[in-house]
Amino acid sequence: MLIFMAFAATLPDTAAVVSHSLPHIAYLPFIHLRGDERDSLSEDAVRGLRAEHKFLLPKYLYDKRGSELFEQITELPEYYLTRAEQEIIDRHAGDIIEKVQQDCWLLELGAGSGKKTRRLLQALEERRKNQTASSKRDDNNDNILYIPIDISEEFLRESCARLQAEFSAIPMQAVCADFLQGVEYVVAERNIAGSQAQLLVYFPGSTIGNLTRSEAATFFANLRRLLRKGDVLLLAADMSAGEIKSVETLHAAYNDAEGVTAAFNLNILHRLSGELSARIPLECYKHVAFYNESESRVELYLESMAYNTFEIGGARVAIAAGERIHTEYSHKFDTAMIETLASTTGFALETAWQDSRRYFSVYFFSATDAPSVEETL
Ligand code: TRP
């Protein structure tokens, strides 16, 4: 908090402050809002592995190694999602930035390799340059800030430092937190600073699909509650299988030939073994992923190939041959589903863009008046 406030005070907030007074930022402002995760990892693992239908929470997939493996997934030939989103952002970054105010804080939910963000930051910088040139002024009254929010501290530090090195004129503030916790923090800081900046919340990677349908609705509603009317949301979502995209295409995206997705999924068990000193017989488990058409989602599990037992967090776990541990859902959407989700939670869909194959979409919403109680019922 202190770091951020000291830092925010250096931003050109009023016309009286000119941009060249911005000091070169040699350090990376970093805020950590998470407690020690070990306790909850142990509790959550015991709860999940002793449940009738076993599960492990997907957030535990993303330790340092998990985040690195996920980066590798995004480059696999079968995993079209990242490239499709990149194509959309590459093509429309200018359109996106044109739709936001000069005074704009770009919040990113989940730090990736930064390739997509880079395009958005470039577009922000270009706009700033063009305006400065055309008005023949060298003062920038805009107040740009880039704020990535992620739960993986090391990964967040590294990816944000890389971007900061590349965009030294754009102030950055990395926030290590759960998404909504991070947004809440930023919103509080905006209020404290008395800033008029508009928030552009970028939720990339079709991560919205990793929530259940009801969790996604709750997430939207909670996000809307934190935002001001006029703040905007840029949401990436993968399309359902149908006439345009086959079930096989989806299946391959989550069952790559090289086995990187399998390694990513299995990494959660490695993590439990390492961090909780659980002796899990890792060789007994295999990655399983398939598209459930009626639910319009890919379901991911770790399947036990033989009966085995192990101890974890002081509890004993037994798993039958063929029994599965659920690790993740990846819900797919059509535009009507997204529109309903948004309009019932206080967002208006302004624009929807798709990649050239129409496999993937990026949606631009603005926060409207919150829906009345009757509408949400
Ligand atoms: N957001 C990604 C998606 O739904 C996450 C993901 C990709 C994933 N591959 C995975 C999660 C494999 C677990 C296992 O596409």
Image (tube, rainbow, N blue to C red):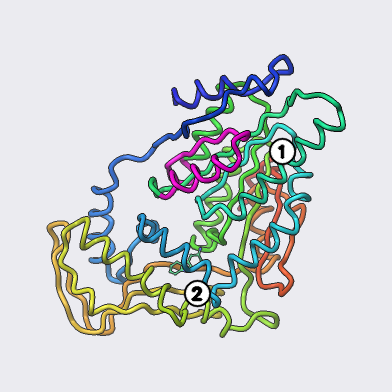
Residues in magenta? Answer: 155-181
- State yes or no: discs 2 and 1 in contact (Cβ < 8 Å): no
Q: Quadrant of the N terminus?
A: top left
Q: Is mark 2 within 8 Å of ligand 1?
A: yes
- Which of the two residues, 192 or 357, is positioned nearer the viewer here? 357
Circle 1 SS class: loop
Residue at 70%, 50% in the rendered image: 365
Q: Residues within 10 Å of mark 1 (few under 14, many from 20)?
A: some
Q: Position of residue 236 (x, y in %)?
A: 62, 59
> What residue did someone put label 2 on?
298
Front residue of 238 and 341 = 238
Task: Give residue 243's quadrant in the image.
Answer: bottom right
User: What mark, if any, has residue 230 been given in the picture?
Assistant: 1
* Rendered position, 47 above or below 356: above
Picture layout, residue 97 above or below residue 84:
above
Looking at the rendered structure, the secondary structure element under dot 2 is: strand
Could you say where residue 374 lies in the image, as x and y percent from the top left? 65, 48
Query: Which residue is at 78% across, 50% downward?
Result: 95
Q: Amino acid at mark 1?
A: Gly
| Residue 100, horizontal then vertical, whole percent | 74, 41
* Horizontal side, residue 327 vs residue 76: left or right: left
